[in-house]
Structure formats: structure tokens, C-alpha cells
């Protein structure tokens, strides 16, 4: 039970967060609600094209970030890391975590194709995949830099 609470529950809750966000047909409106006033504060004459471009960058950056977190959480479930873990980095574990994140991204985009006002996009799956890979690469860099405490 402790293993479930420590490793599986965060992953499942994060998957629910992603699912809930993809079920929101007004997600662009939510982004615009806080982004447009900020942009207009910096430049009251900001063009609609600039607003659209910044909104696209923010939304796709959010995609990459949420899937970087998902891949990390999937890696945690598979690896079950411990403090001062002496085990070497496993590319196989990272590959399985990446595959799980990509599969979830594909099912998420498929789900969005059924939500009124949303569309499923293979481009978004690619962006999510890139975010997942970057999250795991970041984790690998951190993992490599940790001191090895092998007795």
C-alpha cells in the first residue's frame, strides 16, 4: 500500500490532471484570460498576431512541461528510486517511461477529438513526446551528477 501511495498515486493523479485539461473545451479562453492582460500591460497596442503567437508558445510549452512531469513520474514508478541509490542509470527504464508517456499523449489527443471545441493533433503528440524526452534527459543529467556512494 505504501508503494502505491508513494509511486503510483502521484502518476495516476497527474494523468487525471492531464485528462481534465484535455476535456476542457474552453482551454484557449482560460489561457487568454490571464495572458492577454499581461501582454497588453507590457504593450497596449500589441497585435492580435503577437497575442496568438505568444499564446501558442505558452500552450505548447505547457504541453511539454506536463509531459516532462508525466515521464518523470512514470520513471519513478518503474525505478522506485531510493535515497543514495547505488544502481546505475537504466536507459531501458527511461525508454519504457518514454513509451508510456507517448502512449498516453496519443490517447489524450484521441480523447480530445471527441471533445466539442477541441481537436486531436498528431503535432501535439510530437510536442508531448519531445517534452517527455527532455524531462527524462534532464533527469539523466541530474542522475549523472549525483555523488556515488558505493561502499
Image: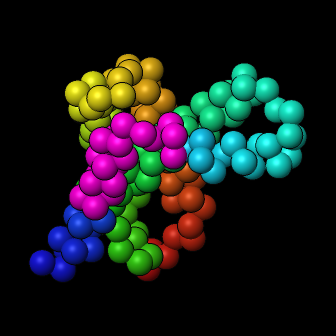
Residue 24 on image: x %, y %: 35, 42
Residue at 82 percent of width and 32 percent of height: 46
Residue drawn where x is 69% and y is 42% of the image? 36
Relative side of 130 to 46, left or right? left
User: Which part of the image, by quadrant, shows the C terminus?
Assistant: bottom left
- Magenta highlight range: 11-30
Please say whether residue 26 is one of the residues in the magenta stretch. Answer: yes
Image spot of residue 62 (x, y percent):
53, 44
Q: Residue at x 29, y 46 (%)?
A: 19
Q: Position of residue 35 (x, y in %)?
A: 66, 45
At a point 43% along the width and 27% down the height, the residue shown is 124
Depth check: give the residue in front, 148 or 25: 25
| In the image, farthest residue toward the front | 44
Residue 93 visible from this viewpoint:
no
Question: Which quadrant holds residue 103?
Answer: top left
On screen, residue 2 above or below 102: below
Quadrant hosting residue 107: top left
In the image, 97 versus 131, the foreground residue is: 131
Q: As displayed, is residue 87 above or below residue 124? A: below
Which secondary structure is most common in the magenta stretch? Answer: helix
User: Which of the pair 22/13 is nearer the observer?
Assistant: 22
Is residue 72 covered in magenta? no
Amino acid at each position: 500500500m505504501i508503494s502505491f501511495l508513494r509511486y503510483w498515486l502521484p502518476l495516476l493523479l497527474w494523468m487525471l490532471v492531464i485528462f481534465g485539461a484535455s476535456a476542457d473545451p474552453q482551454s484557449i479562453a482560460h489561457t487568454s484570460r490571464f495572458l492577454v492582460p499581461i501582454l497588453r500591460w507590457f504593450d497596449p497596442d500589441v497585435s492580435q498576431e503577437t497575442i496568438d503567437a505568444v499564446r501558442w508558445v505558452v500552450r505548447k510549452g505547457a504541453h511539454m512541461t506536463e509531459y516532462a512531469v508525466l515521464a518523470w513520474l512514470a520513471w519513478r514508478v518503474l525505478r522506485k528510486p531510493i535515497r543514495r541509490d547505488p544502481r546505475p542509470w537504466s536507459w531501458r527504464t527511461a525508454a519504457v517511461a518514454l513509451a508510456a508517456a507517448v502512449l498516453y499523449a496519443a490517447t489524450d489527443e484521441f480523447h480530445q477529438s471527441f471533445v466539442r471545441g477541441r481537436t486531436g493533433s498528431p503535432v501535439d503528440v510530437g510536442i508531448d513526446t519531445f517534452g517527455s524526452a527532455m524531462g527524462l534527459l534532464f533527469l539523466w543529467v541530474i542522475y549523472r551528477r549525483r555523488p556515488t556512494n558505493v561502499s
